[in-house]
Image (cartoon, rainbow, N blue to C red):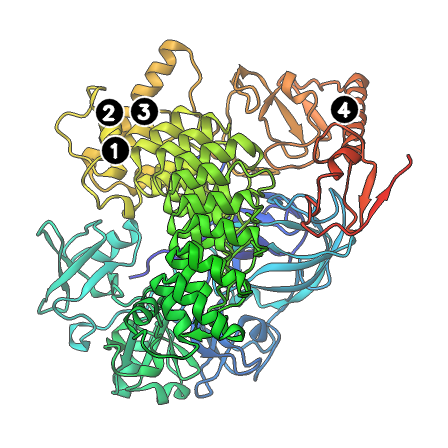
Amino acid sequence: VRPRGSMEVGMRVVRGLDWKWGNQDDGDGHVGTVVEIGRQGSTTTPDKTVVVQWDSGTRTNYRTGYQGSYDLLLYDNAQIGVRHSNIICDSCKKHGIMGMRWKCKVCFDYDLCTQCYMNNKHDLGHAFERYETAHSQPVCLAPRQNLPRIILKGIFQGVKVVRGPDWDWGNQDGGEGKVGKVVDIRGWDTESGRSVASVTWSNGTTNVYRMGHKGKVDLKYVSDVQGGFYYKDHLPKLGEHAELQRQESAEGHTFNQGDKVKCLLEVDILRQMQEGHGGWNPKIIGMVHRITDRGDVRVQYSNNIRWTFHPGALTKVNTFGVGELVRVLEDIDNVKRLQAGHGEWTDSMTPALGQVGKVLKVYADGDLRVAFNGQTWTFNPACLSAQSVEVDANLMTVENPNVSGIISVLEKLLSQSTDQDNPSRLVIEAAHGSANKVRELVQKYPDKVDIKNQGKTALQVAAHQGHMEVVLALLQANSSIEVKDEDGDTALHYTAFGNQAEIARLLLSKGAKVNLLNNSMCTALHIAVNKGFTDVVRVLSEHSADINLQDSYGDTPLHDAIAKDFRNIIEILVVVPNIDFTQQNHRGFNLLHHAALKGNKLATEKILARARQLVDVKKEDGFSALHLASLNNHRDVAEILVKEGRCDVNIRNNRNQTPLQLAVTQGHGDLVQLLVVEGADVNVEDEDGDTAMHVALSPSNRHNHSSPLNCHTRLSSSGLMGNTELSVGAAIACFLAQEGANINYANHKGKSPLDLVADTAVLQLIKSFSEKQRYVQLLTGCSTSLRRVHTTPNTMTNLAMPVLPGPSECLICSELALLVLFCPCQHSVACEECAHRMKKCIKCQVTITKKIRQDQTEVDCSPDSEQHNLLEQLQSRYRQMEERITCPICIDNHIKLVFQCGHASCIDCSAALKTCPICRQTIRERIQLFV
């Protein structure tokens, strides 16, 4: 069986044998990146074609089996994560060959990576085998001797580059047109290899940019450089068949009764392999019921239906998780056999046989990365068995709970005899609240007033217990307020532990330092908030406790109050004048993020009332407050963020996901409905090209068979449901179709949402809701949430089918109009009125040189527009100048005083300041300005 090789975005390619497109690639030997896979029904990128972004900056589509022709050769697939985990390149010695593997047929156990093979390492007279992936059959190749070798050109180390089509990094490069130099090409963690470029820009900054990672290309070269060589005759045709390795038959015991298995292949490949082996079934995971006499595998699914599979179409489903302990089989021959296509085998792995290791990573194909005493290897899960944690204590992580000993210490003190006559008796009497006894003892032992018993002083235990007379007696005897116990707690901390507000007030009036930290970096305010003691919190706040101090986790007191939903404390803390709502804890959550994460409606409202500017602020991973609320099904908080905070409902995280996509991922039907009603774009795509419809119909959303109530009710009212029972994902998909989602929108793998549906009843239902939506649109003439059609922004199109011009929806104003064609990018996305002031295409960010109407006349960009832009720039600069000289506190008077830290304020605001409101430094100097 020869199934079609998988094509994925990110692969690096060069022109192939059927090339007929001139120098679109900038000449023979130039390299490009696959950025889109063709799909059926597309007018610009049909099935069996791909779109390539060349390093020179041009982009168009090419044949990969279309019309029986192959325009491209696969040069490198490391960018999509292809790895031969345990194979070492015998030339450069890199462990775990990324991309294609080249194995010598003459020498024993000799392998090369692509770079070494193409750079003529090893004997040129030796024949080699090419492995496209770890699971593909080897392809025999003739010796390289006397074969023509082509110079590889494109973006490599040393080349000068500018921002490219997928640039999404603001002005990191110093601005449009600024030139940088590539200093390195490397992989992105362990996800992909040779997929990002490290660039140093002319402004001195250095950052990493995508060159194939996730199918994105952030750069294009100014002029190419040489990046090596390649043998054209030894590279595979992109899109041509690549034979998979055959799995062991039943006699090889690859599959056993009870094994959980899944199908590895796409439907068309599976159908081909299954001919004569039991037909095909699109189900995801099943269990091996038995092995037939001919070696086929009988698989049973959850609905008790059984199917017979060719063993080569199945793989075992991994049952191990990260952090679990596993033991390797001891039989070396069996392990070698099982490792074929699963990380392979090298003799240096021998010491791991029979040993216990810890799982570090689970790969997408089920293979495991396992650690053994400082060494790590990739194993087929069939080589491993689960191991109980008692086997090797060195592999276990023991967590020692941090237990507060205050209560137990007090119990010990209270149980001690008061008959003894020694200074430590003072602490016992203080715990009992015996004020007279305390006075006698401090008179008898005046220098022992701060003596400790069980690690605590008399003042600390009296403060905790609330014995006011005892505290007064001890203070009169000059007991130290600032003495700490072994945990760093002072008497003021003890008032917070014991909920003693009046004692706290007394200690503060006697000079106790309100912001002292204990060993856990907690102030008394942190402790009072954590315990929920409102009165103590109020007293500490009245005495200027610093609400912005962070504990060992980076949490401020308000972080803690939000997490525990102490409403009265939240009310007290959010009105503190100098609170900094932007303070992030060690996980990167500011106070609004934290409120959204915890679903705290009150805190969200109060924070937005004082700091609405935080509503769209993102964490380092790109998550905003709305992302967090949507992911965790906090509908009330999401509604506040949208309606009161007026947040961007289509804001993206670092994976290009919107809040709607995250809500769909988790099956939060009511939240999905809210976001769509509030204007969420149902057709926006994430980094994989998936829309909310793709996510709703993904396997992870098909398991739950209880539909979301409100969403399901709304669908039922349509009259299309009948008695169909829907899973959460299917119900959400129907709702999205009803709201204008494009059911034919193809992701980066060329799959539409309908391609993910196995159940014909659900498939027909989704189509019915989509057709109803289109019918309603035609009747009403209203535009829907369908904002765009999925097309990769091609600079040119080799295989485009003619499309009649007509009114289309403007992406700016959403009106139906004749769109203007932008040059040189060839995009038509805006009407003439909206396009008039545009300098760059909003789709690809390419600078516009011409704007052409559909009658081929050019749009005249008058000087009036330029004058208007100049006026806007001047007004913006004036506002910036005003901001620089305006007091940041009152935002009214001009700055007249500068502090030693460099920040400033007006004279009126400065009078009450002890610390800088910007950087929190103590103000030591005030320098008056006379301007």
Q: Which residue is mark 3?
A: 738
**Given contact means CB atoms under 8 Å apart, are the residues at marks 1 and 2 in contact?**
yes
Bin the neighbour count of mark 4 within 10 Å (Cα to Cα): few under 14, some 14-19, many 20 and up: few
Q: Which mark is residue 305?
A: none
**Tag 3's secondary structure?**
helix
Inter-mark Cα distance, 2 to 3: 9 Å
Nearest to N terminus: mark 2 or mark 3:
2
Inter-mark Cα distance, 3 to 1: 11 Å
Bin the neighbour count of mark 3 within 10 Å (Cα to Cα): few under 14, some 14-19, many 20 and up: many
Which residue is more in the foreground, 429 or 110? 429
Q: Position of residue 669 (x, y in %)?
A: 30, 34
Q: Position of residue 485 (x, y in %)?
A: 47, 70
Tally the marks.
4
**Given contact means CB atoms under 8 Å apart, are the residues at marks 2 and 3 in contact?**
yes
Q: Which residue is mark 4?
A: 872
487 lies above or below 689: below
858 lies above or below 39: above
Nearest to N terminus: mark 1 or mark 2:
2
**Given contact means CB atoms under 8 Å apart, are the residues at marks 4 and 1 in contact?**
no
Q: Which residue is mark 2?
A: 715
Nearest to N terminus: mark 4 or mark 1:
1
Q: What's under tag 3, amino acid-wise?
A: Gln
283 lies above or below 667: below
604 lies above or below 126: above
Q: Which residue is mark 1?
A: 731
**Tag 4's secondary structure?**
helix
Q: What's under tag 2, amino acid-wise?
A: Leu
